Image: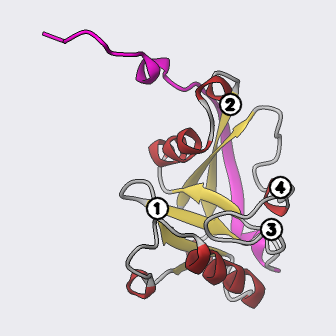
Amino acid sequence: MLVYRIQKTQHTDPLDLTGARLVDGRWHCAQYPLIYTADSPALAAHEIEVHYQQTVLLLKWILWEIEVDDDALEHFDQQTLPQHWRTTKLKTRDFGSTWVQSQQSVALVVPSAIIQGCNVLLNMTHPDAKNSIHIRKAMTHDFDTRKWVNRTTTQK
C-alpha cells in the first residue's frame, strides 16, 4: 500500500519518531510513539492544514511517498469506535497506544477524523518495521494560498 506524509523540509527522515515522542496525538500517547501517514496526498495535506497556522504553511514542505508491505497491514474495526470519537481523543489514543505496545502489526489502517479516507499508523518500534516500510520518493510540496484569501466580494 502506498501512503503519504508531509513534513517541513528540515526533517530528512519521514520515519523518525522524535516529534511523536514529544506530544500526544489522536492515536497515541507520547510514550508510545508512532508515525502518521495518509492514504492519499490530499488527505496528508488536509492533516497538516488543520494542525498548523497559515503562516507556517508558507514554509517549505516535503511530500513523502512510502510503501508499506500488504502483509504488514492491519485494518482497524471502525465499529468499535464510540459515537463521538472525532471530538474526543481519549478512546483512540488509548487504542493506538495499546496497539503500539502489543507489537501485533507494523501498520494499522484507521479512519481519518477530518475527511473520508484513512490514516495509516506506522509502528517503527515493531521488529519488522525496517523490512516492511520502504521510502519510495520525496517531492517538494507547496500549499495553495488561494484557500486563505478573504472572499468578501460576491462571485458572479
**Residue indicated by mark 1:** 112
Q: Earlier in the sequence, mark 4 or mark 3?
A: 4
Residue position for label 3: 30
Judge left or right: residue 59 versus residue 38: right
Q: Which amino acid type is shown beneath numbered disc 1? A: Ser
> Disc 4 marks which amino acid?
Asp
**Residue 141, how many percent across, how many down?**
60, 29
Q: Quadrant of residue 17?
A: bottom right
Quarter the C terminus occupies:
top left
Does 81 sit above or below residue 8? below
Determine crowd level at label 3: few under 14, some 14-19, many 20+ residues with C-alpha closer than 10 A.
some
- Tell me if label 3 and label 1 are in contact, CB under 8 Å: no
Q: Which callout, 1 or 4, points to the residue nearer the camera?
A: 1
Q: Nearer the viewer, mark 2 or mark 1?
A: 1
Whether residue 149 appears in magenta in the rendering, the answer is: yes
CA separation in Å, label 1 and label 4:
22 Å
Q: Is residue 88 magenta?
A: no
Part of the protein shown in magenta: 127-156
Location of mark 2 (residue):
61
Number of the front mark, 3 or 1 = 3
**Eye-nearest disc, 4 or 3:** 3
Neighbourhood count class around disc 4 (C-alpha, 10 Å): few under 14, some 14–19, many 20 upward: some
Q: Earlier in the sequence, mark 2 or mark 1?
A: 2
